[in-house]
Amino acid sequence: MRLAEFARRPSSVRLRPDGLLGTAEVRELIENLWRQLAAVSDLPGKAVAVQTRDPFCATLALVALWALGGVGVPVDPRWPAHRREQVRRKADVAAELTFDEAARSARAIIRPEYQGSLFPGGAYILFTSGSSGDPKGVLVGAEALECRLSDLQAMLTPRSGGSIAVITTPTFDISLLEMLLPFVSDLTGWYPEASVRDHVPALAKSLAEERPTVIQGTPTLFSVLTAAGWRPPAGTDLWCGGEALPAPLATRLAEGLTEGLTEGLTEGSGRVWNLYGPTEATIWATAWPVTEQVREWKVAPIGVPLGSTQVRLEPFARPAEHGRPGERGRPGERGRPGERGPGGEHGPAASELWLAGPGLATEYVREPERTARSFPVVDGRRWYRTGDLCAADDSGVLHFLGRRDNQVKIRGFRVELEEVEGEIARMPGVAQAAVVPQKREGVVVRLIAVVVARQMEAMAVRQWCRDNLPAYMCPAKVIVTDELPRLASGKVDRRELAGLAEGGPGPGPAGG
């Protein structure tokens, strides 16, 4: 089914606490948006900011735009004003939809600064953290999204007649699967209100009452839900991704789904999937069904490629070699799960995962050089260099080993540590800043900033971050010092900084 048809044949949805909205009612809400969008002349190919945290409003806006040929740019109204303007400017949005979420109505505001950019064939532009200090805008085409929805439906095979919980913020690309799967299947989308989505105890209670048959989330989300007493009912499909899935959590989830079943935790039962995919590969690119074998590793494998996705493992290249395949190492020489190599983190033959196929993003908007580096053409095929170091086991299953840069994932959101460091360094009185992640069971739970400054309170630095960065990028702890630890070479000793982070107290409240 084509994206342009979604608005013509909308899915029924269940809203808490309103109940079921039928096709005609959803279509009426979409038509109200069309009347607003009529103010945007020559809409096809133009980017339109969709400013809302409500997944239902975002669903209406995106399918309304696609029917008219527009390109959606999800924007979180809670982002600092500086961040929102960065996104508007870089995507060169022609207009912005701002929502009254209670009434599910929107107002289209024409942006006079529009410079005439067009993105023909585009579906959405999603912004992720960028090491240069500016967020990166990933343009995904309509065909790539259609292909990926088909791949995911075929591999994950959600059971007929069920429902999917739509609980992920629209600025996180996995939300698209929750919002759009009902349009290509007979699933009903279940949309709880913000007071439920944003509070773990309320969400745990609501999930237990509604019993959706499909729940997608990060390992962090499933961990806090189970800590709040929630247990997935047997038969529920759990789709987990966005960050490393610790084996103990994977086992708890799968065992919970098989309680009362005679065969226990075996392949094909439990319906827990570990999913992997960067924004540039459109939602998810690989998948692995959790089995008892997960106990052999610290974290669950990321699995095998989705139907139309191809993978290759390239020997890790130095930055100067980016943009072409690595030349070191013999064919078939690959890192193995658990090996340790340079820096003590990755195997000596740890390989960078490259992805290809129709699900790849089109480009980074307004960044042709970055696009060329990250999407090289090799052997006549266009690839995306993920920056993730992986190894394949004897069965061809992929295992995530780490990163080749300073990028981390926090509750599924991608964060370039250099961007956070650069933002703190802009603060008057700050001489230097370094940001390190604190991990628990292999999962990043918070960021810690070490700041070189004189006569400055840590609270002032945290406030600066809250004023200039999305909440999920803000360090939970700030240490003000006279100097950063350094190696003999003069470089910052990140190992010592990491040790400081690991020795800190537990994580603060979730942001973002």
Image (cartoon, rainbow, N blue to C red):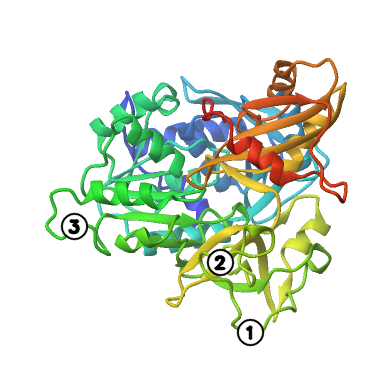
User: What's under tag 2, amino acid-wise?
Assistant: Glu
Density class for disc 1 (Cα within 10 Å; few <14, some 14-19, many ≥20) is few
In the displayed structure image, the side of residue 246 where residue 354 appears, left or right? right
The quadrant the C terminus occupies is top right
Residue drawn 76% across and 34% down? 86
Density class for disc 2 (Cα within 10 Å; few <14, some 14-19, many ≥20) is some
Q: Quadrant of residue 94?
A: top right
User: What's under tag 3, amino acid-wise?
Assistant: Gly
Query: Which of the numbered marks, if any, corresponds to residue 512?
Result: none
Q: Earlier in the sequence, mark 2 or mark 3?
A: 3
In the displayed structure image, the side of residue 138 where residue 157 appears, left or right? left
Rendered position, 200 above or below 434 = above
Residue drawn 60% across and 32% down? 472
Residue furthest to the bottom in view is 331
User: What's under tag 1, amino acid-wise?
Assistant: Pro
Element type where label 1 sits in the image: loop
Q: Which residue is mark 1?
A: 331
Q: Earlier in the sequence, mark 1 or mark 2?
A: 1
Element type where label 3 sits in the image: loop
Pointer 2 with pointer 3, Cβ within 8 A = no
Rendered position, 467 above or below 312 = above
In the displayed structure image, the side of residue 352 where residue 158 appears, left or right? left
Element type where label 2 sits in the image: loop
Q: Which residue is mark 2?
A: 339
Between circles 1 and 2, the one closer to the viewer is: 2
Between circles 2 and 3, the one closer to the viewer is: 2
Structural distance between the alpha carbons of marks 1 and 2: 18 Å
The quadrant the N terminus occupies is bottom left
Q: Which residue is mark 3?
A: 264
Structural distance between the alpha carbons of marks 1 and 3: 40 Å
The one of 130 and 3 positioned closer to us in this rendering: 130
Rendered position, 296 above or below 66 = below
